Image: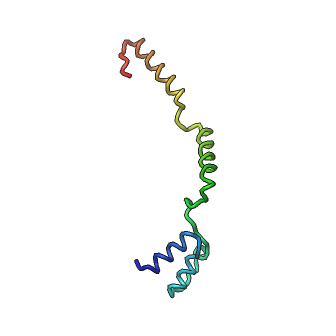
Amino acid sequence: MDKQNKRHIQQISHGIKTPNECREELGEKPSDDENMNKYYMHKTLIPLDLLDKIAQQESDKKSKDPNTLASNEEMGSKKEDTKQHNAVLGGTDDS
């Protein structure tokens, strides 16, 4: 891939130019697809000061999700239940 194409890919992926703008610069006919006239940017490119806010929002979502893994406290309680169950049945405590 030549230097000009790499530059166009970077410009498109960083929201500097639309795909059709780059096609025209390369001497190609613009596409009729309406999405080729839109600006694109990687989802991961965000201002650094928003990282903490986003991380907190994701953490809040996980803590409200009933499908997330049990807390360490719950897991400890389940481990104790298993030990008691094994003792009653005459099993060994391998933990």
Q: Which of 77 and 5 is in front in this view?
A: 5
Nearest the eye: 82 or 72: 72
Residue drawn 56% across the image and 60% down it: 43
Q: Residue 15, how many percent across, how many down? A: 59, 71
Q: From the viewer's perspective, is residue 5 above or below residue 61?
A: below
Judging from the image, the colouring scheme is rainbow
For residue 28, above or below residue 9: below
User: Of all residues shown, which one is farthest toward the bottom?
Assistant: 27
* Residue 7 at x, y percent in the picture: 49, 76
Vertical placement of residue 51 versus 40, above or below: above
Q: In which quarter of the image is the N terminus?
A: bottom left
Q: For this rendering, which residue is in front, 43 or 78?
A: 43
Tell which of 17 and 69 is nearer to you: 17
Q: How many marks?
A: 0
Q: In which quarter of the image is residue 42?
A: bottom right
Location of the C terminus (image quadrant): top left
Q: Where is residue 38 in the image (x, y as percent from the top left)?
A: 61, 73
Q: Residue furthest front?
A: 49
Residue at position x 59%, y 43% from top?
59
How far from the left and from the top, in percent, is residue 86?
Answer: 40, 16
Residue at (36, 15) in percent of width and height: 91
